[in-house]
Amino acid sequence: VADPRLNEGLINNPNNAPYLDKILDRTEWRRYHCGQSLRYDIALRSEPIPNGCSLVDALGGGPRLLPELGSLAEGFVDVSEGKVIRDALGSNQPNARSAVGITSEGNILLVVAAQKPEAPTTSGMSLAALAEFMSSQGVEEAMNLDGGSSSSVYYQGRTVYGKVDKQGNKIKRKILSVLLVQEKIEGF
């Protein structure tokens, strides 16, 4: 599990200084090994690992979408005198987005909201709309993964790109990190 405090670009960026405590305690997707089973959770980085469990891996992201939107608490958005002075994700604008969620039954949902080529500037979802959609699918805990041209999915040999340019062309780019889903491994 990587430590964001070791990311010099993050730590030394003067624009992040007022929000650094919040940034360093953002939401993460966690996988635990608890006895003989795996368990998934969405938690703030500072939240303790449950008793009887060990942390297998964690994927940083954010903000938390459900049970409530965590944009302000996690430093993605800041408001002063009733006016938004920081919105690092364009939270209220429609955009390509990706998210992960957990239902009450423990099922995992991966969601990619792609922009439509015929409506490049008005399609996609705001973070609130993404949270509402996930809730309508029975998700109780959810976290935003990434947005814009980082939002894509590869499934059964097909890639779906989330972001389009102003002319409606798919934006393809190299992705630095992924959430990989594979068949269950024996013993886990």
Image: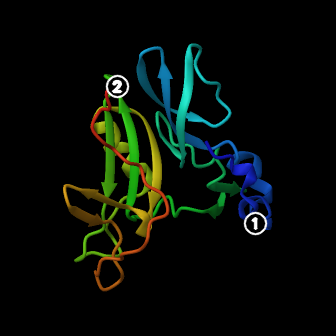
Query: Residue at the location (37% across, 63% down)?
Result: 96
x and y, in percent, of residue 150 in the image: 43, 65
User: N-terminal of the two: label 1 or label 2?
Assistant: 1
Q: Say which amino acid is labelled 1.
A: Asn
Q: Residues within 10 Å of mark 2 (few under 14, many from 20)?
A: some
Most distant residue in the bottom direction = 167
Between 71 and 3, the one lying in front of the other is: 3
Label 1 and label 2: CA atoms lie apart by: 38 Å
x and y, in percent, of residue 8 in the image: 76, 61
| Quadrant containing the N terminus in the rendered view | top right
Mark 2 — residue? 106
Decide if residue 105 is on the left or right side of residue 143.
left
Q: Is residue 47 above or below residue 4?
A: above
Residue 15's label in the rendered image is: 1
Q: Residues within 10 Å of mark 1 (few under 14, many from 20)?
A: few
Between 85 and 90, the one lying in front of the other is: 90
Decide if residue 14 is on the left or right side of residue 58.
right
